[in-house]
Amino acid sequence: MSSAESIARAAPESEALAAWAAAALGVAVTAVEPIPAGIGLRRFYRLRLAGAPGSAIARVDRPEDPAGRPSGAAPEPPLEPVRAFLERNGLPVPRRYAADAARGIELLEDAGRESLCDAFSAAPRAAGEALVARALELVPRLQRLADDGSGVDAFRRRLDAALFRYKGELFAGASLAAALRRAPTPAERGAVLDAFDWIARECAAAPQRFAHRDFQSQNLIVRRDGGLVMIDLQGAFLAPPEYDVVCLLCDSYLELAEAFAARERERVRALLPEAPAPDVFALRFDLLTLTRKGKDHARFLTAIARGDARYRRFVPRTAALLRRAAERTRAVAPPLARLAELVLALPEEAPCAR
């Protein structure tokens, strides 16, 4: 098939992207390949180019669903200027070639097809774990960033009580019925929300550090030379120092051995600026695991209920991570004890998609 035929057979959005990118770069677009979408609304395309740089990624925003954030919270910021801020500070992010803010399009460097998730799955365990360890070394670098006055929204956004409550509402709305094998009572829903509110108060006293916010293996691209590139940067905010560490060491897409995760958690803790005490770090790590993995578990179940079977295989690991954190924290406070009862009742297997 010729390049013209390839683009002509693509969706109208692909045709429009090809025309726009060719004009922006001054080079012909020979093919447009949709990249499989995740749970969110954003769409991605790989553009094949007749000249340098050879290929590029078109990132296309969709109209936002307000249900994807707490009521009254501001929408997620655009990719710029946080991408440029990270680039200036030497963090590995994609280069930006062009943009059309009115249409929500960013044309970015194509860092490659292989995510850390893919590389870990394909490599021998020792090599996969070495990649994860290298990725974790980006976290202290992120946490040393300071606001330079360039208008980066991440320094005005934080993991606050409203976000914790939102995560609790997702878990109570989707996962609680799976644990109980029936519709939850108002008191049972309230127990989940009370626990997430308790965690929010505990984490509010923590130092607030720059966090990627979704520092997981599908958002880390492995270059051909073995280097790592962070993507999906726009959600960055201030959070307790454990947040990004939880994202990767409790990644639903990686089957990390518990012993490796424990060693890496301690190694990275010691590298963080003003490193938290081990017991404080361990407790907040588990509390943030409960809230982040609770949200992920709920979103996976919701996607499965809508007929998207791709996420079914990630539910058992997510539930296992929740159960471990619940076991370790159940004696800390009464709200956590009740949450632990509910979490420990989660089934190991995910429901079938419709």
Image: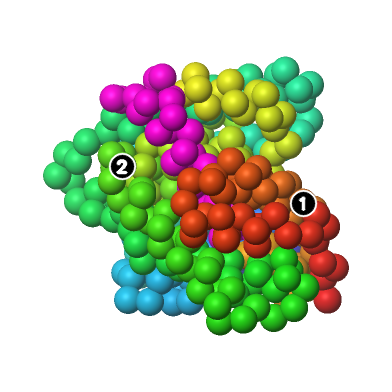
Q: Quadrant of residue 99?
A: bottom left
* Residue segment shown in magenta: 269-297
Q: Which mark is residue 206?
A: 2
The residue shown at (79%, 59%) is: 347
What secondary structure characterizes most of the magenta part? helix
Residue 24 to residue 257: above or below: below
Q: Is residue 155 magenta?
A: no
Label 2 and label 1: CA atoms lie apart by: 30 Å
Q: Which residue is mark 1?
A: 316
Q: Position of residue 226 (x, y in %)?
A: 60, 22
Along the line of sight, the residue nearer the viewer: 252 or 323: 323
Secondary structure beneath disc 2? loop
Tell me which amino acid carries mark 2.
Answer: Ala
Residue 64 to residue 144: above or below: below
The residue shown at (67%, 24%) is: 259
- For label 1, count other residues whose C-alpha is less than 10 Å away and answer few (under 14), some (14-19) or many (20+): some
Of mark 2 and mark 1, the one earlier in the sequence is: 2
Tell me which amino acid carries mark 1.
Answer: Pro
Closer to viewer: mark 2 or mark 1: 2
- For label 2, count other residues whose C-alpha is less than 10 Å away and answer few (under 14), some (14-19) or many (20+): some
Question: If the image is split into quadrants, where does the N terminus sit?
Answer: bottom right
Give the side of residue 65 with respect to residue 161, left or right.
right
Give the side of residue 254 with respect to residue 65, left or right.
right
Along the line of sight, the residue nearer the viewer: 46 or 348: 348
Q: Position of residue 203 (x, y in %)?
A: 36, 48
Give the side of residue 17 with respect to residue 276, left or right.
right
Secondary structure beneath disc 1? helix
